[in-house]
Image (spheres, grey):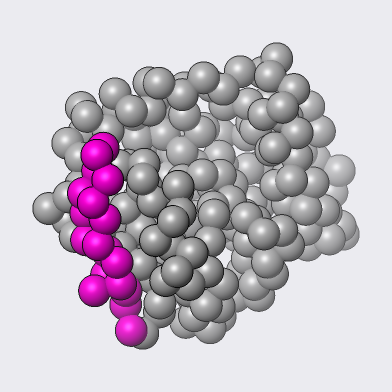
Amino acid sequence: MFHEDANKRIQRPYYQCLQCQLVFVPESFFLSQSAEKAEYDLHRNHDNDSGYRQFLKRFSDPYEERLRQSFKHDSAEPLSLLEFGCGPGPVLAHMLEASGHHVTLYDAFYYPNLSVLADTDYHGISATEVIEHLHAPKDVFELWLGCLKPRGILGVMTKLVKDRAAFAQWHYKNDPTHVCFFSEATFAYLADQYGLHYEQVDRDVAIFCKF
C-alpha cells in the first residue's frame, strides 16, 4: 500500500503499480455516475474568468507551440483538435478556436458523443484535469493515441505525485473523483511503451508526440 487516507470527507487506500509507478485507488472506491456528475456540477469555470484563462494558458501556450512545430509544413487550414473531458464550460476550446483551430468536444457527462472518438485524424488532443478521473486510464490513453494522426500532439494537464511524504499531505488526492495519480516516471514509462516523445513542459503539463 502506498498510502491510506482517513480524513472526514474521504477514506481510501492508495496503491502503486511497481511497473509504471501509477498511484491509484481500488475500483470499489469509485463513485457512481450520478455521484461523480454531482461533483462536476459544482465546478464553475467560465469564459469571463480571467484567472481560469490564465491557468489554462500554462497548457495552451506550449500545446499550440508543439502543434505548430509538428505541422509547420502543412497547409494553412485550421488544425483539427479534440478536447477530451471538456466539462460543461469548454473554455479551453474557445481559446483554441480563437487561435484559428477547429475543436471537437467530448465529455462523458456533458458532450457524450461517442462518434467523435471514431475519428483517427486529429492533429491534437487536449486533456486538462481529466486523466486523474479516469477509471480505465490505459484504455483511454490507447484510445487517444488511436485518434491521433502521425506527428499528432497529446497534451495532458494534471498534478503529479512527488513522493509518499508529499502525497500524505496532498490536497489533490482528497477529491473523491480523483482515482489515479501520475508522476513523471509514469509518463516516461508510457512514452517508452508506446514509442512517444515526452516532454514535461510545466510542473502540471505533459506533452506527447506520436511518431
Question: Which residue is drawn at the image coordinates 59% and 75% (left, top)?
Answer: 196
In the image, residue 155 above or below residue 89:
below
Q: Please report the bounds of the magenta region as a residue range.
A: 1-18
Side (left or right) of 83 relative to 130: right
The percent position of residue 92, horizontal first and vertical second, equals 65, 32
Residue drawn at x 79%, y 46% as measured from the top left: 61
Q: Is residue 45 left or right of residue 37?
A: right
The quadrant in which the N terminus is found is bottom left
In percent of width and height, residue 207 lies at 66, 62
Q: Nearer the viewer, residue 178 or 192?
A: 178
User: Can residue 2 be found in the magenta stretch?
Assistant: yes
Can you say which quadrant of the picture contains the C terminus?
Answer: bottom right
Q: Main secondary structure of the magenta part?
A: loop
Residue 40 found in image quarter: top left
**Where does the image place residue 20, in percent across and percent down from the top left?**
40, 79
Q: Quadrant of residue 79?
A: top right
